[in-house]
Image (spheres, rainbow, N blue to C red):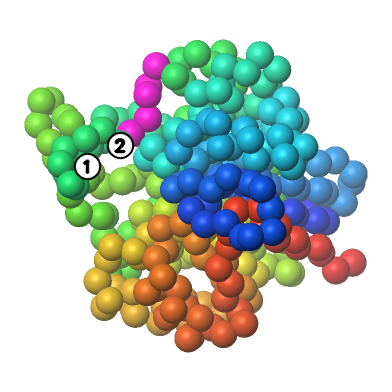
Amino acid sequence: MNNKPGIEKLELKVLICDRSRYINDLWSQFGLSILADCYWKDGHSRRILFDTGWESDPLLHNMNKLDIKVDDIDALVLSHCHYDHTGGLTKLIRNENAKFKLIAHNDITRPVYSLKPEIHYIGLDEKLLSELPRERLMLLADETEIYSDVWITGTIPRVTDFEEPEEDVYVLKDGKLVEDPEEDDMALVFNLGEEGIVVVSGCSHAGIVNILYKSMDITDNKKIKSVIGGFHLIDLSQEVRKRTVEELGNLNIEKIWSGHCTGFDAEYLLKEKFGKRHEMFYTGDVINFTINK
C-alpha cells in the first residue's frame, strides 16, 4: 500500500538562463539555474535549487528581485560539474545563513578540461565543497529519492545509439588527458503520479532521451508530463538533432521546455515537431504544475 502524501503542486522558476524577456529587470548569463518549490498534500513543502549558473552575482541579484532568500533553500542539486552550472556556488556556500544540503554525483570533483578553443579548466573547485559541514554534503552515484516522489537520477546509462559524450572534453588522470565519459550528468525528477513525471535537466550530456528512459525507470511511471532544461544539441550534428527530436516524439511528452545549450537549430526542429507542446524558456519564467484532485 502506498502511504506517500503525493505531490500537490510544483512551481519551477528559471533564475538564470542565457536569454531574457523584455518585461523584467533580471540578469541573464550563459548557464542555468532553476528553483523548484514543491508542495505535498499533507501540507509540507521543500525549496530545491537546481544548478547555480556561471557566477554568484547574477544569481543573487535575481533571487533578491524575486524575494528568494538563501536560507529558504532546503536542497541544492547540481546536474554536473561544468562551470556554467556550478560557478554560482561560491557565495551560496559561504552565506552564513545557508542551511541547504548540497546533493551531487560523487564524480563531480574530477578535473575536467575542454580543448576548445584552447585547453582550459571547466570543472568545479573541489576545495569549495570541503567548506560545507559533512552533514550538508551528499555525493551519490545511484538514483536516490531525496524527498517523497522527488528523485535524482544518478548515473545515466547510455542506451541509445546516437547520444555520445561531447567531443574535446577530457579528464586529467595520472598525468594524462583521457576522454571524459561525463558520468556525473544527472537530472531531477518529480513523480506526480497519474499526471506523469516532470524531469528537470541541466545540459543533458548523457542524452536527453537516455535521461527520460532512466527517469521513467526509477519512478516506475511511463507518462512524461514535462521535460525542462538544456538538451546540449547546440554543437552536435543535424543528424543527432533530428534523431533526438524523433525519439522524443515517440515518448508522448505532454510539454517540452527548452533553453540554455539546446541551440536555436534544435529548437526550430522541436517547434516543428511538437508545435504548442514545445516552448522556449527565458530568465524569470515560471512554470506551474497543479495536480487535479
Q: Mark number for residue 122?
A: 2
Classify residue 96 by image quadrant.
top right
Please state which of residues 203 and 40 is positioned toward the viewer in this rendering: 203
Quarter of the image with the C terminus in it: bottom right
Please state which of residues 137 and 90 is positioned toward the viewer in this rendering: 90
Residue behind mark 1? 114
Magenta-colored span: 123-127
Q: What element carries label 1?
A: strand
Residue 79 visible at all? no
Classify residue 210 by image quadrant.
bottom left
Q: Whole-Å distance between the Cαs marked 1 and 2?
A: 6 Å
In the rendered view, does 45 fall on the left or right side of 102? right
The residue depicted at 58 percent of the width and 25 percent of the height is: 92
Q: What element carries label 2?
A: loop
The residue depicted at 48 percent of the width and 86 percent of the height is: 272
Q: Magenta region's main secondary structure? A: loop
Mark 2 belongs to which amino acid? Ile
Q: Looking at the image, do the residues carrying marks 1 and 2 touch, with CB atoms under 8 Å apart?
A: yes
Q: Position of residue 127 (x, y in %)?
A: 39, 16
